[in-house]
Amino acid sequence: MKQITATGRTVEEAVESALAQLQTTKDRTEITIIDEGKKGLFGIFGSRPSVVKVTVKMDPIEEAASYLKSVGEQLGAPVNVEVNREGKQIEFVLTGDKIALLIGKRGQTLNSLQYLTQLVVNRYADQYLTVIVDAEEYRKRRNDTLIQLAQRLAQKALKTGQDMALEPMPSYERKIIHSALMGNKRVKTFSDGNEPHRHIVISPVK
């Protein structure tokens, strides 16, 4: 976070000096007046300069995109980041030659990246934002896979009369399972266990 303390004959002058040094504009900063200053006799004797502290407001989306690029570089898989925003949901779409490294087994690396990017975004955002990090349409393919898995295990639960426990999943993936079986009145779904081992259980209605 960039910030600077500047002085001037007036508060306005001090602010202008700080903005020039930071190479930014007033709307992208937070200004704190430390001392309004004092003109003094004849504008000279006993005068005291105005002192302000100017802090550059970080753009949460820019910071998150920069973070993702940095991680890609560190993992030896440079990425381009495309940002799509819809209301309070921000989607970061990653592309690159070695994108598989950032997806990981069953999307575990991508899920971790999404969690960390969520923290970065909401560290700087004025309101809580939801983050999705995707690559090569992995989320869509995973979504389709989870729906098929839910339906298959629901049939198995009905056939055997036993509860079916799925592997641990992040909360948004558990929601996909819940939603997929919401219309099936013959089974019920619930979450069990504690994070990071929380999982879905599909149970036949008796």
Image (cartoon, rainbow, N blue to C red):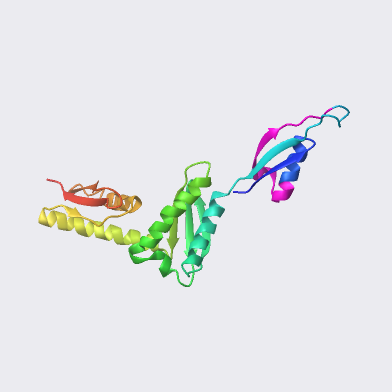
Q: Number of labelled discs? A: 0
Of residue 103 and residue 4, the one placed in the foreground of this image is 4
Of residue 83 and residue 98, the one placed in the foreground of this image is 98
Q: Which residue is found at the position 73% from the left and 31% from the top?
A: 36
Vertical placement of residue 97 versus 46, above or below = below
Q: Which residue is found at the position 27% from the left and 52% from the top?
A: 197
Can you name the residue that lies furthest to the right here?
42
Q: Residue 172: give x, y in percent of width and height.
A: 35, 51
Can you name the residue that lies furthest to the bottom here?
97
Q: Is residue 40 left or right of residue 84?
A: right
For the record, the magenta segment spans 19-40
Q: Is residue 47 left or right of residue 29?
A: right
Q: Residue 17: give x, y in percent of width and height.
A: 75, 44
Indicate whether residue 21 is drawn in magenta.
yes
Q: Is residue 167 visible?
A: yes
Q: Residue 43: give x, y in percent of width and height.
A: 86, 30
Q: Residue 57: give x, y in percent of width and height.
A: 60, 45
Q: Which residue is found at the position 47% from the left and 43% from the top?
A: 128
- Screen quadrant of the C terminus: top left
